Each structure stands twice: as structure tokens, then as C-alpha cells.
Amino acid sequence: MLKPITFVSISLGAAVLLLALLAVRWFAPPAASQPPGSAATGFVADIVIPPNTSPAPDFTLRDQNNQPVSITTVRGRVVALTFLDSHCKQLCPLEADQLAQVQRSLGKNVPVSVLVVSVAPATDTPESERAFAAEHHWTGDWHWLTGTQAQLAAVWKDYSIAVQITPEDIIHSSVLYLIDRGGYERAGFAAGLVPDVVARDIRFLAA
């Protein structure tokens, strides 16, 4: 196994680079857009995307119950989209605990769905996905999405997720996207989520 500090350093570096690239992709010229995390937008995310400007790339993958799930099927709900490995012992468990805190903070009345796209198609299984979710006390509506290597690679590419599968580990970007109820990307968070901040932005989108 790679040493934790090596994995964390690479993952955090990838996340920072990814957010920088996404800022270039998403933001209009400065004169026409609000600064990230400003009071004018209502968000405090790392990256803030103006409304109705960036439709979330759609896909259809199977969840832990073998049901097809897409961005379209959860339209009308806020989506928290992330990319994890159910066997990971590094950053993924940390993000899972943070997501659980977000779910507890939001309760049952906020229409939010957590979509996890697998970065480990060879090893993620319905059993390992459910075990991972149970270990980290996930509640509410969540779906762990898997498919073939080709299907997942297309989603990784659409969402600018770097995945490097090695014999020792899986190194991947650690980013959480928020997608609004109309299916538009609205916010991005790098690794090291602050649950209260994420919950606040989800409430803003759900209002």
C-alpha cells in the first residue's frame, strides 16, 4: 500500500488542480460573474457556478440495488455527487463520515440525494457498498453507482475526475459536486469537507 501521506498529498493536489481547472471551465468573465463563496450568490462552496449555465452531464448507472439511476431520475432533488472506492482506507472514509454529518444535519425534510460514482469497478460490489455506507452511518437517499470500466471512465471524464488504478491502490480526485433541482451544476468542494458548510449550500439549493 502507498503510505497515507503520499496518497493524501496526491489526492489533495489533484483536487486543488481540478478545482482550478473547473473554475476556468465554469466561470464567465469576471465582470459578468460573482466571486466564489460570496454573499451575493448565497453559497460558501470552494467553487460557485452561476445558475442555469452548466447542465450536469447525464449518465445512467446501476446502484447497489441494481436499479438504474441518472441525473434525470433524481430531477427535482438536490444532488450531492462524489466519487469513491468502497475498499479505500485513506480519504474516502473521511469524506464518508463528513457526508453522514451532512445527512444528519439536513434531516428527512430536505430533498437531497447522494450519488456516489465508483472509482473501483473491479472491486466495488453491492455488498461492499452497503457495508461501507453502514459503517459510516449513511441515512436518507443514497445510491452507489457502478458499471463497466468504459461506462465509468466516460462519467469520470465528463466530471473531470482523474483516476489512476495501480496494483497497490486507486488514486483519484476527491471532489463533491452539488447539482440543483433543475439538473445544473452549482457548486464544487475539494477534499476536506466542512459538513455545516455543505449542508448550508444544500439547503440554499433546496429552498
Image (cartoon, rainbow, N blue to C red):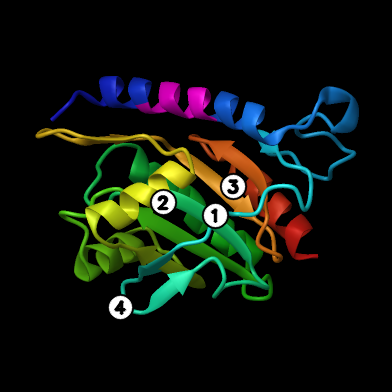
Q: Quadrant of residue 46?
A: top right
Sequence-wise, which precedes: disc 2 or disc 4?
Answer: 4
Q: Amino acid at mark 2?
A: Val
Q: Amino acid at mark 3?
A: Pro
Sequence-wise, which precedes: disc 1 or disc 3?
Answer: 1
- Let me know if residue 17 is in the magenta part: yes
Quarter placement of the N terminus: top left
- From the viewer's side, name the closer residue of 159 and 178: 159
Q: Quadrant of residue 136?
A: bottom left
Q: Amino acid at mark 4?
A: Asn
- From the viewer's side, name the closer residue of 80 and 158: 158
- How far separated are the C-alphas under marks 1 and 2? 8 Å
Other-residue count near label 3 (Cα within 10 Å), few / some / many at <14 / 14–19 / ≥20: some
* Residue 114 higher or lower than 168, as above or below: below
Q: Quadrant of residue 125?
A: bottom left
Q: Which is in the foreground here, disc 3 or disc 2?
A: 2
Q: Residue at x 37, y 64 (%)?
A: 144
Other-residue count near label 4 (Cα within 10 Å), few / some / many at <14 / 14–19 / ≥20: few
Sequence-wise, which precedes: disc 3 or disc 2?
Answer: 2
Q: Position of residue 117 (x, y in %)?
A: 38, 55
Other-residue count near label 2 (Cα within 10 Å), few / some / many at <14 / 14–19 / ≥20: some
As drawn, the label of residue 195 is: 3
Which residue is tagged 4? 66
Give the dominant element type of the magenta stretch: helix, strand or loop. Answer: helix
- How far separated are the C-alphas under marks 4 and 3? 29 Å
* Residue 16 higher or lower than 78, as above or below: above
Pointer 3 with pointer 2, Cβ within 8 A? no
Which residue is tagged 2? 155
